[in-house]
Amino acid sequence: MTSRPIGFVGETSTPVEITVKATQPVPAGTYIYLKFRVRDPISGQDLEREVVGVIGSVSFKSYVPIVTTTRSEISESYISELKRESYMNAVIVADITGNRTEPPRYPPPPETPVYPARVEHLKVVYPGRSERSVKIGSLLGFEELSISVDVNALAKHLLVVGTTGSGKSNFVAVLADRVAQLGGSVVIFDVHGEYRGLQSESHRVHVVDYEATINLVKTPIEMLVRFIIPESAATKQRRILRNALRKLNEEVEKVAQEYRVAYSEAVKRLYSRHRGGRGLRSSESVENPIDMYRELLKEYVTREHTVGSSSAERSVEDVKDKIDDFFEWHNVGLDTPNVSEIVGCGKVVVVDVSALVDAEKDYMLKVIAEDLLWSLKQRRIPPTMLVVEEAHLFISSKTQTWSKESLQRFIREGRKFGGMLVI
């Protein structure tokens, strides 16, 4: 090596972690190179190994007590460097012996010199772009080295980790765009709405903004009841609403099947039938199918307790108030298409769930994961990459969520049919 070592391996080391001792620290994130000899106990041969790593944490330690003084004219003496030492923890990235990348298997011996890595060392680990990879950027400090991701390797799924503000979302946006440029299909579950208005670098990529809505007919009754009445102690109110929803949705589906129309048209016909026949108690005339559904639901709730005690009547009125609040503050729909109906080659579908509360986001993720998995199994859609932002909220080992099992199934079974998960 022509360059001077930045330090030496400390007292202990493992194949993947070492402690570096030096008189002066180097910045965290600095790439390092080590060359050392080890004896193979089986063959008895001396082997020469070359590895590259990266500096993690950096610290200084003084060997003598620090004494404060007011004498500003005191300057560092020639023995100052002898009174302190720097400790650095480093991670060994790969063994590059013979210009071939393999997992590190031998711990570097103590006192092994540690050098700054050069371009020729890192090229072995980061060989650049190939026909089956997408470029996502360049290596920090080595702009001439491009970093690429093998698209075929994504079939084993991908974990993106980093500190707050480190660029995880930007990486996902670049990766999704580059995969779509190759003709891939991408779905981004956008928790915070930060991908809305995503622009592609290529005119061949079509970005679709999909605003997630709660389908009033397709959503399971029990889930819908919890969304409208989140208080678990309101058992009487939930029972009233559950019965009303079940009866209303059965009628909506019956009309939709009988006349072969969409749910919104079925609600219109049902609303006209009730208003012109038995009549709705609301004197206001509405034209929006969503408002029609709301008035129908409130009427069905009223029918649950036409005669009863004052407490029962109060419960009915409370349910109707919560229905109004729910429809006012939540995105709901009747004919919302499934995500699988929108995905396609060269498309990035951004599912914006920022307007939903946590429980609704959880349910929406469950619906999307199951919809994509079923469509992949039926060969109805091309291989699709599902990106889940803030995945720790949904697949935590400490809590049970609605989407957790669906995502686990997507991981286990999806890759066999072209489903890839990025979290």
Image (spheres, grey):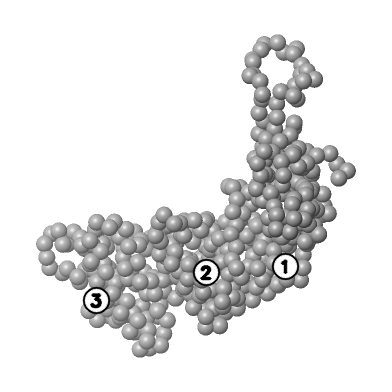
Mark sitting on residue 309: none
Frontmost residue, 2 versus 273: 2
The three-letter amino acid code for the residue at tag 2 is Ile
Q: Is residue 394 left or right of residue 69?
A: left
Spatial CA span between label 1 and label 2: 22 Å
Identified at 77% across, 56% down, the residue is: 45
- Hey, which quadrant is residue 100 in on the image? bottom right
Residue 8 visible (yes or no): yes
Q: Position of residue 344 (x, y in %)?
A: 61, 76
Q: Position of residue 321 (x, y in %)?
A: 28, 59
Quick one: SS at disc 2? helix
Callout 3 crowding tier (Cα within 10 Å): few <14, some 14–19, many ≥20: few
Identified at 19% across, 70% down, the residue is: 304
Q: Quadrant of the C terminus?
A: bottom right
The three-letter amino acid code for the residue at tag 3 is Gly
Frontmost residue, 412 versus 361: 412
Residue 104 visible (yes or no): no
Q: Is residue 56 above or below residue 342?
A: above
Q: Nearer the viewer, mark 1 or mark 3?
A: 1
Quick one: SS at disc 3? loop
Q: Which residue is mark 1?
A: 133
Q: Are marks 1 and 2 in contact (CB under 8 Å)?
A: no
Q: Which residue is mark 3?
A: 279
Q: Is residue 388 above or below residue 81?
A: below
Q: Is residue 376 left or right of residue 177?
A: left
Q: Is residue 421 left or right of residue 32?
A: left
Mark sitting on residue 411: 2
Spatial CA span between label 3 and label 2: 51 Å
Q: Sequence order check: which comes first, mark 1 or mark 2?
A: 1
- Hey, which quadrant is residue 313 in on the image? bottom left
